[in-house]
Image: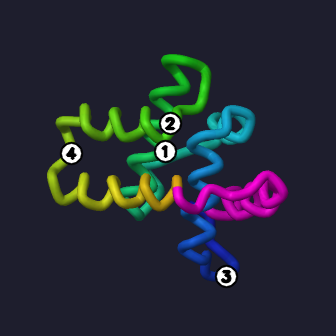
Amino acid sequence: MPKKTKETNPTDIVRSMSLFATDSDFMHKFLPTLEPKSIRQPEVAWVMKAVIKHAKDTKAAPTFEILRSMLEADHGLRDEEKELVEPFIDEMEERRPKRKEREYYQGVFESYV
């Protein structure tokens, strides 16, 4: 992961991940450059991996319901990990950015990855 010039706001990460996870155009822009292994937050890394997997299968971004079903079906995760990811998905849905905020959160996502 590249060095950050400033600390990233956790709410910004949630909102930018929400946009990445559910907006196909945004997702396709970043798919070729993603390396979820370098992400230190397990819930963010899991969402990235799930989005990548779903995109390979369908060529589209998942919905929040699809992410939840993927989480439920992921038997490789421990309960503690699921307890991190589940509320993260809920928070992403609650804090999904408005259309006019798209450019800002795209920049946040670029600097994060």
Q: Which mark is residue 77?
A: 4
Q: Looking at the image, do the residues carrying marks 2 and 4 touch, with CB atoms under 8 Å apart?
A: no
**Residue 14 to residue 21: above or below:** below
**Residue 109 to residue 71: above or below:** below
N-terminal of the pair, mark 4 or mark 1, is 1
Whole-Å distance between the Cαs marked 3 and 4?
Answer: 32 Å
Per the image, the residue denoted by label 2 is 51
Amino acid type indicated by mark 3? Lys
- Dot 4 crowding, Cα within 10 Å, few <14, some 14–19, many 20+: some
Amino acid type indicated by mark 1? Met
- Dot 3 crowding, Cα within 10 Å, few <14, some 14–19, many 20+: few
Amino acid type indicated by mark 4? Leu
The image position of residue 55, as x and y in percent, is 55, 26
Per the image, the residue denoted by label 3 is 6
In the rendered image, which quarter is residue 12 located in? bottom right
- What is the magenta segment's predominant secondary structure? helix
Q: Could you tell me which residue is drawn at 54 percent across and 18 percent down?
A: 58
Q: Could you tell me which residue is drawn at 60 percent across and 77 percent down?
A: 9
